[in-house]
Image (cartoon, rainbow, N blue to C red):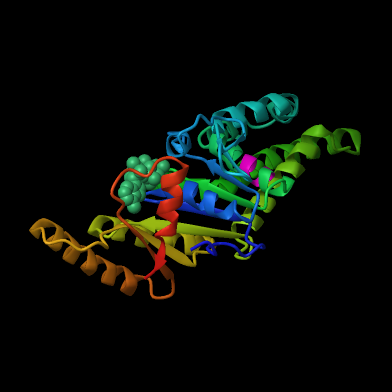
Amino acid sequence: MTTLFSNPDLRLVIVGGKGGVGKTTFSSALGISLAETFKTLVVSTDPAHSLSDSFEQPIGDRIAPIDGVKNLFAFELNAERAFREFMNTHDADLRRILDSSTYLDQSDVDMFMQLAMPGMDEVMGLKTVADLVEQNHYDKYIIDTAPTGHALRLLSMPDLLDAWVKVLAQLRWKYRKVVETFSGSYSPDSGDDLLLSLKKTVKRIEALLKDPTRCEFLPITIPTQMALAETERLVNSLWKYGVSVKRLAVNNVLTASGADAVFIEKRREQQTYLKQISAAFPTLEKLQIPMQASEVKGVQKLRAFMATVAPI
Ligand SMILES: Nc1ncnc2c1ncn2[C@@H]1O[C@H](COP(=O)(O)OP(=O)(O)OP(=O)(O)O)[C@@H](O)[C@H]1O
Ligand SMILES: [Mg+2]
């Protein structure tokens, strides 16, 4: 299925799902397939990166070309480094904003400190991806995410950044009132510029994630009870958040025939769950990926894996 996600307007495919269902394998394989037509970048936002394992070549926190696949590049994002770089670049402006607040409520500063730290590395990770998409050096971007909870947290990052900006803006507003009261006028400084640019960042990321022509989330699942329950929660959360989901991939499907009793029973069980999956997601296009005979690693096997993807 080489036509999957080949609409040129679609720039970003976010691949997500429960632990171990094949997110990294599918992201890598989709990258290989899209690279036949498009300059493609696969980014892992999972702190436990495994794109290197999947492609069987070292990758890391710098964009690297994939050996043997023209037009394909990959990158294992280090969100903590992205956060540190942001803090280093904007240290003076952040201090300026906080220092101005020392004339004001200590509780404001406390609130900022509490909101600022948890999740800010992920905010900056997502910002890095959004920046990459906007720099427009690639036609297609694929994000290989960490298991469900983490992926959902990633998508809530614009809200977190927004909350962060609001607290800072509140501090600035109070400061501005004090300055205006004493000196009659206030001229915005680089602290205000930073706030404005962060506000724009929130809007940019949200606009990208919630634009169904540019961004699509592809959930991957497997035909088991637990995976089905988690996929329902994931898809509902994505829809609530406003992220487009049009397809669902079901991996590890036993498609071969065999006479072994365990195999026959396993297949029967899978068919039950496949029916339940179809009933649970009537509006989604369903894709199945057969269980392969061996682990799917290296470009050749990834290519073969992609060739087996078929509509259900
Ligand atoms: N259809 C398949 N047939 C056989 N093996 C598969 C198939 N899909 C994936 N695998 C293998 O299953 C393992 C898990 O796959 P993968 O790493 O892609 O999952 P993941 O969802 O990214 O896991 P994690 O949640 O840990 O990031 C890998 O060893 C991969 O080669
Ligand atoms: Mg993975």
From the viewer's perspective, tell me whether residue 272 is left or right of residue 159.
left
User: Is residue 78 positioned above or below 292 on the image?
Assistant: above
Is 84 magenta? The answer is no
Q: Nearer the viewer, residue 60 or 169?
A: 60
Q: Where residue 10 appears, x then y in whole percent?
A: 62, 61
From the viewer's perspective, tell me whether residue 100 is left or right of residue 128.
right
Residue 140 visible in the current orientation: yes
Q: Which residue, as the protein is rendered here, is positioned at the far left?
A: 261
Count of marks placed on residues: 0
Q: Residue at x 72, y 27 (%)?
A: 89
From the viewer's perspective, tell me whether residue 193 is left or right of residue 258.
right
Q: Over which residues does the magenta segment extend?
A: 127-131
Is 129 magenta? The answer is yes
From the viewer's perspective, tell me whether residue 16 is left or right of residue 125.
left
Q: Where residue 250 appears, x then y in whole percent?
A: 35, 60
Picture quadrant where residue 98 is located: top right
Q: Where residue 103 appears, x then y in whole percent?
A: 72, 27
Q: Nearer the viewer, residue 309 or 83?
A: 309
Q: Nearer the viewer, residue 81 or 62?
A: 62
Q: Residue at x 72, y 28 (%)?
A: 90
User: Is residue 210 positioned above or below 76 on the image?
Assistant: below
Residue 21 visible in the current orientation: no
Which quarter of the rendered picture does the C terminus lie within? bottom left
Q: Main secondary structure of the magenta part?
A: helix
Q: Which residue, as the protein is rendered here, is positioned at the far right?
A: 184
- The quarter of the picture showing ligand 1: top left
Q: Where residue 202 appears, x then y in whole percent?
A: 66, 48
Q: Residue at x 74, y 38 (%)?
A: 172
